[in-house]
Amino acid sequence: MAPVSLIRPTSVNVVQDLNKTGILRRFLQGMAYCPSNISGTNEELEKIMRAEMNNRNICCPQLEKTLHLAASLIELGYHDCTLTEKTNIALYNWYLIYIDDMSSKDTGPFMAFQERFLRRMPQLNPVLEALVEVLMRIYELYDLPTANSILSATFNFVNSTCIEPEIETLPLTRGLVRFPWFLRDQTGVAIAFALLLFPKSKNIGVTDYIQALSDMNFWISVTNDILSFHKEELAGERANYVYNRAYIEDKVPLSVLAEMSQELFESRNAVYAALAHCPQAADVWHTWEQGYVRWHIDQKRYKLSELSL
């Protein structure tokens, strides 16, 4: 991998004068975004996922419409993983998307997921039963501390996703500046996707990347928020990290978006500083960050083509 350009953050006051498109363009330029020639389509992976869905008899419109969405992120971000590893990560991603989309329609089976997992009871939803097997395979593919952390993050995600709609009805209290990030972190499961980058086959120990994990976690969640902002603005969505933070900090949303871009530059620099002693881990992260951004740009759901980025 060529040396990574680290970013010297610009004064936020300068960035505040930019519009939404300007902020997003600067973010892409700042991280030296350069689309690779990797295809986001892996027909073999998608065939395996479809076979899993059919064999388990869990075929439904929601899984159908998100199959390629789930698989393409894995192909772009985890490109150098083995097919076995990609398959498990893709299924994990697919089933978590299902939970995110479906839990608000009937919270019961999802709220019971963790208890039934720990009590070794059958799940109340067949997709959750499939997720259990995916989680068990993580222990075959990752070392014990990493697998434990992925499982913990998954439990936090499912639980927090179930109660998020109720939290969104609460009036926000100005001055509670840490709450927007707490809520975003709990529902983002970003730490799990960072840890999934380091299966045992890569022979990268947890001590090689553990100091980077907090910034990896922040970068994954907040990059998603920046690249989702246009879509959510068009849809009139306000219950998100940008708007929660803007209200609590008494700022306009674009000002917060600009600050987030600055914070991402700092976070990205911190990741590479923490991985400087392990070039292999830095390469793994570089593939992920470039693929993650490209995935957002490629997906029609984010409508970023409208901004001519």
Image (cartoon, rainbow, N blue to C red):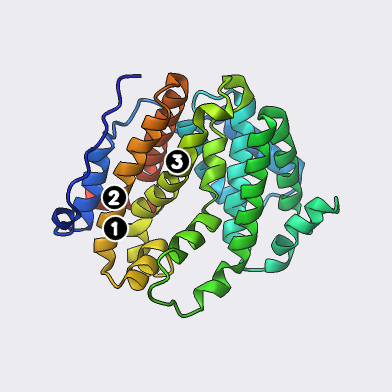
Instruction: Where is residue 8? Give x, y as percent.
Output: 21, 39
User: Along the horizontal axis of the image, is 46 left or right of 277?
Assistant: right
The CA span between labels 2 and 3 is 15 Å
Between 232 and 119, the one lying in front of the other is 119
Q: Residue at x 48, y 35 (%)?
A: 211
Above or below, 34 against 235 in this view is: above
Q: Residue at x 66, y 53 (%)?
A: 155
Q: What is the residue that sits farthest to the bottom in this orientation?
A: 171
Residue type at mark 3: give it. Answer: Met
Marks 1 & 3, CB-CB < 8 Å contact: no
Quadrant holding the N terminus: top left
- Reading the image, the residue beneath label 3 is 216
Marks 2 & 1, CB-CB < 8 Å contact: yes
- Reading the image, the residue beneath label 2 is 261
Residue 41 can be seen in this image? no
Between 43 and 269, the one lying in front of the other is 269
Could you say whether the residue bearing mark 2 is in a helix, strand or loop? helix
User: Along the horizontal axis of the image, is 75 left or right of 306?
Assistant: right
Residue type at mark 2: give it. Answer: Ser
User: Along the horizontal axis of the image, is 4 left or right of 148?
Assistant: left
Within 10 Å of disc 3 (Cα), the crowding (few <14, some 14-19, many 20+) is many
